[in-house]
Amino acid sequence: MDTVVLGFGLGLAAAIVDVAPMLVRRLPASATASAIAQWLVMGVVISNCDLGLPGWATGMIVGFASALPIVIVVAGNAALVKPGEEAKTVAIMLVNAVVLGGGIGLASRMIAR
């Protein structure tokens, strides 16, 4: 299977998992669109990235690294996070990035075999 197509498919699955709670909480459309775009791109990147590690580890590292810029913006923007919830929001975003990234890495290696 073409790894770009596979990456988009896995990225779409990760986007659905990440965005569902955002829709329930009625977060801004720009935040939802950003998450969808991030996971579509990360699906392709992780599926085509070889760090010499198992797929799940590569996915976790790339997922974490790709989330850092977004986390910095969100943590510093009072309009996006309720006062006092910055640490909780950052933790949720980083855990999602690591878990979903690892899932993409694992699935892409298993399917591509």
Image: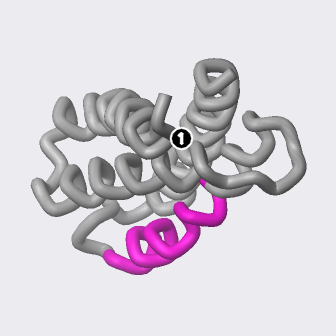
- Rendered location of residue 31, percent (x, y): 23, 58
Nearer the observer, 14 or 82: 14
Q: How many marks?
A: 1
Q: Residue 13, image x and y in percent?
A: 37, 28
Instruction: Read off the residue under disc 1.
Output: 96
Which of 7/17 is in front?
7
Location of residue 8 (image quadrant): top left
- Residue 109 on image: x %, y %: 68, 29
Residue at the image point whose x is 25% and y is 40% from the top: 22
Seen from the viewer's position, the closer of residues 113 and 82 is 113
Span highlighted in magenta in the image: 63-77
Relative vertical location of residue 14 with respect to residue 42 in this rendering, above or below: above
Relative image position of residue 71 (x, y in whole percent): 49, 67
- Depth check: give the residue in front, 31 or 10: 10
Is residue 44 shown in magenta? no
Q: Is 41 placed left or right of 78 in the picture?
A: right
Residue plotted at (43% across, 45% down): 4
6 above or below 67?
Answer: above
State the colouring used for the structure image.
one colour
Q: Which amino acid, by three-letter code, is at mark 1?
A: Asn
- Principal SS element in the magenta part? helix
Which residue shows up at 44% across the image and 69% down it? 70
Q: Is residue 57 left or right of residue 14?
A: right
Kind of element beneath mark 1: helix
Location of the C terminus by quadrant is top right
In screen coordinates, is 56 left or right of 89?
right
